[in-house]
């Protein structure tokens, strides 16, 4: 009889454990089911809102093609800017001062402006523009406007990050404009060539006549100091001459003793690759400086 009671007691314990396990399993399943039901309910409520927002964005994109065009333009500008900086850094040497000598009758302000902006973009600090007829000097405001416009077209938002000095006349009055790097743009004419040497020599003679200096002070170095005070820019290491005339046409005769000249057929329709080729030729040349 005692054995029978023991078996019944153990059976009851087993049933109790089975019941507890079954209750725990049902609780877990119920919680999981409630969670999935809540997630599905929320998804059903939010789905129309998400679809409506997507539809609005799609309509705005279709009705505003300028936004997509602006994005593509910005990416292209950034790509070109990066390329120009990399090209400038890849050169064996880069001139600090470059001269653009135009020996053609009809100047193209747009093409010269492109050349100036490209020079800025690769990292050249001083750019001089010269023609022996004085077209650019007489119309320096037009050239300046074209440079600013081409800078905006070629550099986009990058154009607003830098300032430059535009020196346009003999007294070197500064016209501050927003340009691409930190260079100085100088417009030159034949007046800045031989005539500037004559003026410096006259100034030196007057100083001797007025007993401000002695005749012993007259020397090449003194004349050099006077000329550099007037120009306030370093000597050009490179001059790119455009046109069929095989002459420097009076381009700063005092300052080009060590200047490398590279000739291109024309400045009209000139490309960035043409300028880069000239810079590469300059970077590869060996200047022996009279040795």
Image (spheres, grey):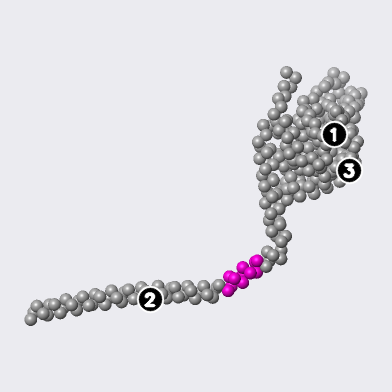
The location of residue 76, given as percent across then percent down, is: 69, 50
| Magenta residues (range) | 48-58
Q: Which quadrant: the N terminus?
A: bottom left
| Residue at which label 2 appears | 30
Mark 3 and mark 2: Cα distance apart in space: 86 Å
Q: What number is the disc on residue 65?
A: none
Residue 280 vs 181, above or below: the answer is above
Does residue 55 appear in this view? yes
Question: Is 57 a magenta residue?
Answer: yes
Q: State the SS at label 1.
A: loop
User: Do residues under tags 1 and 2 come within 8 Å of each other at their CB atoms?
Assistant: no
Q: Nearer the viewer, residue 101 or 63?
A: 63
| Residue at which label 3 appears | 139
| N-terminal-most mark, 1 or 3 | 3
| Residue at which label 1 appears | 243
On the picture, is 95 further left or further right than 220?
Answer: left
* Residue plotted at (70% across, 60% down): 67
Residue 251 vs 16, above or below: the answer is above
* Residue plotted at (70% across, 30% down): 283
The location of residue 112, given as percent across then percent down, is: 81, 41
Mark 1 and mark 3: Cα distance apart in space: 20 Å
């Amino acid at each position: 009889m005692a054995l029978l009671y023991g078996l019944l007691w153990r059976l009851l314990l087993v049933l109790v454990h089975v019941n507890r396990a079954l209750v725990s399993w049902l609780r877990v399943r119920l919680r999981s089911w409630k969670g999935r039901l809540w997630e599905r309910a929320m998804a059903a409520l939010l789905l129309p809102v998400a679809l409506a927002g997507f539809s609005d964005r799609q309509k705005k994109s279709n009705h505003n093609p300028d936004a997509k065009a602006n994005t593509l333009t910005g990416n292209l500008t950034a790509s070109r800017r990066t390329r120009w900086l990399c090209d400038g850094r890849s050169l064996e040497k880069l001139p600090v001062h470059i001269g653009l000598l135009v020996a053609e009758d009809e100047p193209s302000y747009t093409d010269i402006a492109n050349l100036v902006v490209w020079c800025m973009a690769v990292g050249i600090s001083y750019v001089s523009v010269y023609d022996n007829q004085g077209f650019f000097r007489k119309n320096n405001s037009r050239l300046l406007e074209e440079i600013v416009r081409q800078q905006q077209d070629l550099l986009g938002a990058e154009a607003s990050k830098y300032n430059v000095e535009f020196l346009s006349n003999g007294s070197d009055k500064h016209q501050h404009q927003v340009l691409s790097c930190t260079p100085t743009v100088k417009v030159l004419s034949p007046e800045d060539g031989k005539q500037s040497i004559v003026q410096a020599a006259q100034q030196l003679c007057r100083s001797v006549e007025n007993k401000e200096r002695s005749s012993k002070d007259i020397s090449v170095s003194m004349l050099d100091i006077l000329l550099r005070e007037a120009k306030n820019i370093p000597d050009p290491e490179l001059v790119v001459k455009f046109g069929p005339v095989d002459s420097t046409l009076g381009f700063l005769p005092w300052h080009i003793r060590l200047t490398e000249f590279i000739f291109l057929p024309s400045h009209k329709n000139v490309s960035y690759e043409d300028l880069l080729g000239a810079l590469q030729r300059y970077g590869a040349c060996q200047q022996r400086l009279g040795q």
